[in-house]
Amino acid sequence: MKKLLAVLAVVAFVFAFSYGAQAQTMTTDIVFLKVGYVPVSLTGFESDSFIGDDLESRGVAVQGEYNLNFDGVWLGFGLEYQRLKAEINNANGHFNQFIQPMVSVKFAATGGLYVGAGLSGKYLIATEKIKDGTDTYEWEKKIDLWANGMLGYYTPIGEGIFLDLEGRFGYNLTRNQFSEMKVNGVTVDTDNKASYDLAFYVGIGFRAAASDY
């Protein structure tokens, strides 16, 4: 249910920004709706941490983004949902789900290439318990501030419609998530280090509409 609500929130975000009640006039602003794959999302731990190894995750993402266009400079506001499968030590894999509001500034060239940077707040909205023998582990749900860099390419495929390809690299600035875990109901510090992720997206973009009134 949480997964469905998160995806619906992304879609609703896009349409709330792109259409008015009597929307008729096309603007230069661009809306993107993307699906993505996260091949690596990694958090490291100190050598003396009871976790021991790095936490490696991979999975899928859905993102909606509205870009205000100021003559080739895009001010973007986005919302992303991620569902990642994590592997840790010899325990069974488990799924973590995140919601991530984002803001970015991108510079778009005439040929369709764009490059940008931004910030996002990434929050763990759902997590599965990890079972290893008689022990159970569960991550505390926290929010982090991430710095993001992106490189993309968009090209028209119809009247006011675009194909978008994008790569994004993210780095965790605050390191709150995965810093604490409940072990058999008792909260312990995991001594986490740096966290980063990499994601690739393909999506459809279209010109936003505005009301004539």
Image (cartoon, rainbow, N blue to C red):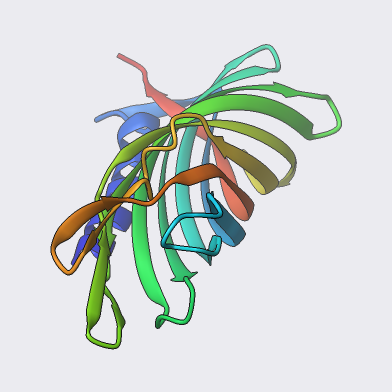
Q: As drawn, which residue projects farthest toward the front?
A: 48
Residue at the image point whose x is 25% and y is 64% from the top: 138
Residue at the image point whose x is 62% and y is 53% from the top: 201
Residue at the image point whose x is 37% and y is 38% from the top: 176
Going by the image, does 118 lie left or right of 192?
right
Residue 73 location (% of width, % of height): 66, 15
Query: Which of the two residues, 16 or 86, is positioned nearer the viewer here?
Result: 86
Residue at the image point whose x is 53% and y is 43% from the top: 193
Q: As drawn, which residue projects farthest toward the bottom?
A: 133
Q: Quadrant of residue 91?
A: bottom left
Quadrant containing the C terminus is: top left
- Residue 124 in sight from this viewpoint: yes
Query: Which of the two residues, 192 or 147, is positioned nearer the viewer here?
Result: 192
- Residue 129 in sight from this viewpoint: no
Going by the image, does 24 lie left or right of 155?
left
Residue 121 location (% of width, % of height): 39, 33
